[in-house]
Structure formats: C-alpha cells, structure tokens
C-alpha cells in the first residue's frame, strides 16, 4: 500500500521484449498489483511476462489475442484494478520510458485527495524535453493546444504523456466503452473527465528515450487525433451546456414545488 491506498499499475505492452522485464522488475515494492497487458505481441513479450509472474506474485497477466491498441490495453488493466478493489490505478508503459523512481510523485496528488487524475508532463520545462525528438516535440505542442480546447482543461500540457494515475472511484464514473482505444486515448480521456468535472493535475518530469522506435506515424496521427478532438469538443459542449442543463431543470422544478 501507499499512503493507505491500494495501488495497481497497468503496464501495456506490444512487442516490448527488450524492455518489459526491466519495467516489471523496477516497479516499486509499495505497488499491490501489476497488470501487465500483452496486446497481441508477436515477439517474446508474453513469454517474458509469464516468467516474471512466476517470480513475482503481484504480476497479473492480461493477454489480448487480438491487438486493440494502447488505449484498449490500458482500459483492460484499469478494469482489472477496479475488479480487485484498488484505490488508485497508474500507468507505466512497457517500453521503459517512465521512471519508476518518480511513481510516488505521480500518485501523491491522487493519494492525498488533491486530484482525481494525474498525468506526466514532459513539455512545460525545456530541460525535460531535451531528449524528445524535434518532430515529436512540435507535434506534442500542437496537440496540447488542441486538447486544451477540446477538453476545457487549459492548465494541462503534454496530453500524450502516458505516465498517469487515476482514482478508481473516478474510473467507475466513466463509461469506459466510449473512450478511444488507440493512440488518442489520453486526449479523449481528458475530454470525458472534464464532463465529470474531475480534478486534473500535471506532474513535470523528464522525457526518457532508450533507442525505441516510435509506433506512431505522427503526420497521420495528428490528423486523426485532430478530427477526434473536434468531435470531442462538440460532444463536450453539448453534454455540459445542453444535456446537463436539461437534467438540472426537472430537479429545480421539483424543489420549487416543494
């Protein structure tokens, strides 16, 4: 446990045989469950995960035989955390780009009741983004501004930062079936959280790259994500300005009648 909270860590993995063992081995001891999600890997990822689970009783293997995308993998892990009654579910990717030494900083605002959802931020400080490739930096800045508009969270940076923690109580309020399954998962998640009026906080941390090739084709990804964010913006405005307002009216009329 960590600060009297049961902690689950979701580790999505697709063809991560080079890094997955180190990721699992370096997750802090205070974590209660490690949900390693094999998203239909074609390399030795599943074999390595299975070996680690025999040596570490905290490892829970979720094996997806059909690739669903990083969002689908993360949601599978979050679902496991909800079923096991964790208090907080964090995400650490299987590619070794998230420093296990700062997991406590990602968890603290949620564990202390200051936020419902915390995400890593590699962009707001120049020294933190020095390892990030230039094209990715430019793309992430663009998606930051688009996501701010779509989500209504004007304080956030680096929406593609996947190092996150969310209270399981907040997870249970989300309709997980309606959240984007692919690489735009983090962006769409923020929009859905805003409609719930969830408290979101950034935690700055350095970008880490260890020679991994990106699975994202950025030109295509930015176009696709921009379209998703446009639809999300319309949905958020309609939901908060019209649907929720209409839900309040009958309640107000009922109270006035009393």
Image: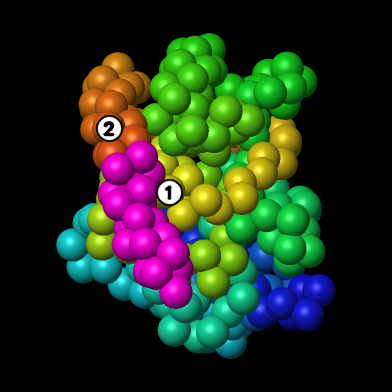
Mark 1 → mark 2, Cα distance in angstroms: 12 Å
Magenta span of residues: 240-258
* Quarter that holds the C terminus: bottom left
Q: Residue at x 64, y 24 (%)?
A: 123
Q: Residue at x 49, y 76 (%)?
A: 81
Q: Give left or right: position of 203 versus 23.
A: right
Outermost residue toward the left?
66
Q: Residue at x 44, y 35 (%)?
A: 151
Q: In the rendering, at what x and y percent does residue 204 appear?
A: 72, 36
- Helix, strand, or loop for circle 1? helix
Residue 47 visible in the displayed image: no
| Residue under pointer 2 | 234
Q: Give left or right: position of 120 versus 4.
A: left
Q: How is the image coloured?
A: rainbow
Q: Is residue 33 above or below residue 249?
A: below
Q: Residues within 10 Å of mark 1 (few under 14, many from 20)?
A: some
Q: Residue at x 50, y 85 (%)?
A: 84
Q: Main secondary structure of the magenta part?
A: helix
């Amino acid at each position: 446990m960590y600060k009297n909270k049961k902690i689950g860590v979701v580790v999505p993995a697709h063809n991560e045989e080079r890094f997955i063992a180190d990721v699992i081995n370096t997750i802090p001891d205070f974590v209660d469950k490690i949900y390693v999600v094999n998203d239909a890997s074609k390399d030795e990822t599943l074999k390595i995960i299975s070996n680690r689970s025999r040596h570490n009783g905290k490892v829970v293997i979720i094996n997806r035989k059909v690739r669903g995308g990083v969002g689908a993998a993360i949601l599978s892990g979050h679902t496991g955390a909800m079923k096991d009654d964790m208090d907080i579910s964090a995400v650490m990717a299987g590619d070794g780009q998230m420093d296990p030494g700062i997991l406590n900083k990602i968890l603290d605002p949620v564990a202390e009741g200051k936020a419902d959802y915390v995400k890593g931020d590699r962009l707001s400080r120049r020294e933190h983004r020095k390892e990030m490739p230039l094209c990715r930096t430019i793309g992430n800045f663009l998606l930051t501004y688009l996501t701010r508009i779509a989500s209504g969270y004007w304080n956030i940076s680096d929406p593609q930062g996947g190092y996150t923690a969310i209270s399981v109580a907040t997870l249970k309020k989300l309709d997980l079936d309606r959240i984007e399954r692919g690489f735009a998962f983090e962006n769409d998640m923020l929009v859905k959280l805003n409609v719930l009026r969830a408290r979101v906080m950034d935690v700055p941390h350095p970008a880490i790259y260890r020679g991994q090739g990106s699975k994202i084709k950025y030109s295509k990804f930015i176009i696709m994500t921009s379209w998703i964010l446009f639809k999300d913006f319309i949905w958020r405005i309609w939901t908060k300005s019209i649907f929720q307002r209409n839900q309040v009216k009958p309640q107000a009329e009922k109270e006035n009648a009393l």
